[in-house]
Image (tube, rainbow, N blue to C red):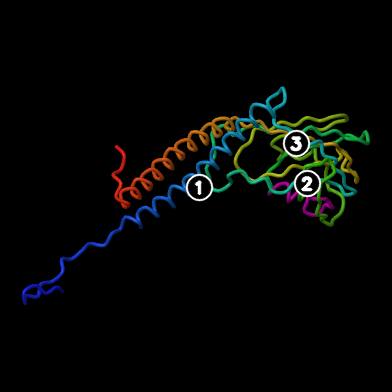
């Protein structure tokens, strides 16, 4: 209240100044958008570099040549879950995987990929080693042993394999990826105990380059949004300090 010549008049109400709050929110949003944009750009560039420099002559990205061995009757991968649920996103042409399996003891070897349920049923009473981890080096492999006995029938006699190969010398198995739950199995063709192989895996992923390019484009858009947000925040600060914003 103010008093003038004996008359008391109310102060004019003043609206709160929200400019500092808006400026801070814009700066925070701009910083967050910048971090996301940098991450998208980095991921996109990495995928493009991998696609253009790390593939072999056949277009496959390859793993190290792993030394896989067991004293049991089979070597089995962990679950390979490829969009097995109805709501999972799945591209029309996801790619192809290839396994080069070279027995080092001269035995005839079997390699096959089958539905997880059928593989589990076939090996339910068989002693095998499950591969739980593959590292960056040839011998960096971890296993989990499952107890059991010898297989009741030979792996090559089973009809559930979606892709399989067996014989002496190096075996090459190529499989076009499809949705479902799968397992890879390595055994001696005669079902005997003790497996010694060198295995190299490769993958040809057709959508790798488009994904990389898409991430780069999204990153560039994110940087533009970042620049706009930070510019508006700076102009609000200048306006608060009494400096007219630049046109």
Residue 218 marker: none
Residue 87 marker: 1
Q: Residue 66: horizontal and vertical position, in percent?
A: 82, 39
Q: How far apart are marks 3 and 2 (CA)?
A: 17 Å
Residue 76 marker: 2
Q: Earlier in the sequence, mark 3 or mark 2?
A: 3
Q: Callout 1 environment at 10 Å: few (<14), some (14 to 19), or many (20+)?
A: few
Residue at the bottom extreme? 6
Q: Residue 80: horizontal and vertical position, in percent?
A: 67, 45
What secondary structure is marked by label 1? loop
Is 180 inside the magenta-drawn segment?
Answer: no
What secondary structure is marked by label 3? loop
What's drawn in magenta, residue-wise?
117-130
Q: Callout 3 environment at 10 Å: few (<14), some (14 to 19), or many (20+)?
A: some
Q: Callout 2 environment at 10 Å: few (<14), some (14 to 19), or many (20+)?
A: many
**Residue at x-position 69% and y-position 48%:** 79
The quadrant of the rendering that contains the N terminus is: bottom left
Find out whether the residues at labels 1 and 2 contact each other: C-beta distance under 8 Å: no
In this view, the mark in front (1 or 3): 3
Q: How far apart are marks 1 and 3 (CA)?
A: 30 Å
**Which residue lies under the disc numbered 3?**
63
What secondary structure is marked by label 2? strand
């Amino acid at each position: 209240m103010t008093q003038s010549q004996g008359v008391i008049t109310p102060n004019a109400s003043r609206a709160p100044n929200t400019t500092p709050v808006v400026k801070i929110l814009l700066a925070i949003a701009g910083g967050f958008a910048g971090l996301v944009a940098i991450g998208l750009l980095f991921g996109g560039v990495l995928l493009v570099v991998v696609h253009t420099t790390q593939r072999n002559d056949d277009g496959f990205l390859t793993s190290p040549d792993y030394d896989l061995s067991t004293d049991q009757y089979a070597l089995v991968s962990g679950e390979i879950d490829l969009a097995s649920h109805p709501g999972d996103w799945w591209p029309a042409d996801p790619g192809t995987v290839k396994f080069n399996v070279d027995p080092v003891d001269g035995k005839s070897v079997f390699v096959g990929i089958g539905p997880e349920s059928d593989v589990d049923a076939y090996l339910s009473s068989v002693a095998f080693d499950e591969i739980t981890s593959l590292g960056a080096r040839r011998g960096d492999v971890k296993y989990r042993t499952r107890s059991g006995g010898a297989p009741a029938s030979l792996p090559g006699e089973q009809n559930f394999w979606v892709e399989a190969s067996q014989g002496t010398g190096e075996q090459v198995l190529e499989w076009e990826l499809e949705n479902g739950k799968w397992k890879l199995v390595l055994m001696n063709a005669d079902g005997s105990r003790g497996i010694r192989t060198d295995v190299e895996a490769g993958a040809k992923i057709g959508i790798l380059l488009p994904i990389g390019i898409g991430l780069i484009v999204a990153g560039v858009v994110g940087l533009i949004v970042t620049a706009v947000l930070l510019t508006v925040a700076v102009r609000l600060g200048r306006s608060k300090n009494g400096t007219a914003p630049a046109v």
